[in-house]
Amino acid sequence: MKNLYNTTQLYLSLSIILGLLTNFSSKTLSATKYTEKDINAIARMATVIVSHWGKKDENEKCTAAGLIKDIDDRKRQIRTNQGSGGLIVAEKNNTYYILTNEHAIPPGADCYGVVVWDGSKKHETYIIEDANIEYIDRPRYGIDLALIKLEINSAGKYYIASLKNSDTISESSQLFISGWPKVEEKETSTTRRFISVQKINNWQTDDVNKCPTNRGYKLCYIGETSGGMSGGPIFDANGYVVGIHGRGDKDDSKSQLGPQRAGIPINEFINLIDSGKSKDLTRDDLNFDPPSSELIAQGKINTKQADTIENLYELFLGCFTILQGEAECRKNPSPFAWNDRCS
């Protein structure tokens, strides 16, 4: 009887110890942060390029024939206007929704271009007309955000970014920004940048230390971003998107900490969705699940190819085939696409 009592006590003790270890282990795992390489892999899967250009005359539309005209002039326009990134925040009814800065896709342009990494082999290019741009706040005055609707009949094709309450970001937190800098003069390729920045509460200026809050820019940080990275996602140390990059201080000399930059907290976007500013999306359409290990593994495949786009202008003008007059435009769904001809 005594042996049975001792055995029972032993089992109880072991159960308590195992329970404590399991609880400690789960808390430790939940608090574990990804490495920069892991977050970069997530960013690689998430970051897209956005461009826009206008029509030559009243009769010209965003069609293959229209794009073939004046190729050199088109290239100059794209060089000037390719200055933004974005990320896919939802997929609904065969439509992907790309979030970017409103100033990156201003009203009035007839053609908008989007380049998306397919996750393994190639960048895919789409031409979007202005009917597929949704300004979810007042253009030029409201929150500097807009949505691009990419209609393709291919569910599950692209990664949907994981969003997180941006109010959880504390002072001095390390954040990461992913984006595609503008192509340098006389260059034809662009390489994605992934940089670390440090959150600060306020910019240092001559008159007052204040983070610029107009147009939603309430997230300030120190870091060396490049022109063209506007609209790119801002990640926290766990791979969640917590903001959209979009501004820099015109005079960094006033800061003793380094280049001063600003982004829009992702809560600004979520609040716009909650208030019904989007015609299509609700909070239930957004992704708040953590990035998966499978996603991170996929983001580490073909990294050099994923992070470099050669001949960007030809991509936007139809993957070289427009230059040869061989573009095969698919009109259903509505955006023209030449993805089958891209490699």
Image (cartoon, helix red, strand yellow):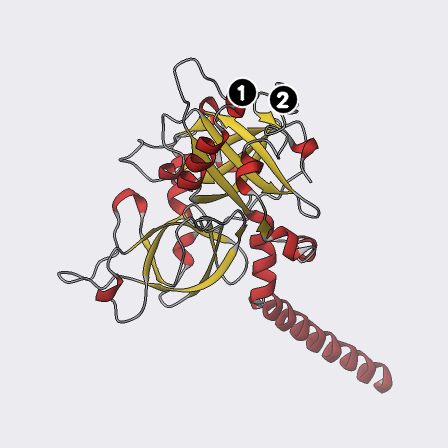
Residue 65 visible to the viewer: yes
Answer left or right for 202 relative to 264.
left
Write down the quadrant of residue 257 in the picture: bottom left
Residue 319 position (above or below residue 16): above
**Where residue 117 sits in the image (x, y, percent)?**
62, 44
Q: Is residue 144 above or below residue 34?
A: above
Cα–Cα span, label 1 and label 2: 8 Å
Q: Position of residue 261 (x, y in %)?
A: 33, 57
Q: Crowding near pointer 1: few (<14 within 10 Å), some, many (20+)?
A: some
Disc marking residue 63 = 1
Give the image quarter of residue 19. bottom right
Label disc, if present, on residue 329 of the rendered structure: 2
Image quarter hosting the N terminus: bottom right
The residue sitting at the top extreme is 59
Residue drawn 40% across the image and 58% down it: 225
- Decide which of tag 1 and tag 2 comes sooner along the chain: 1
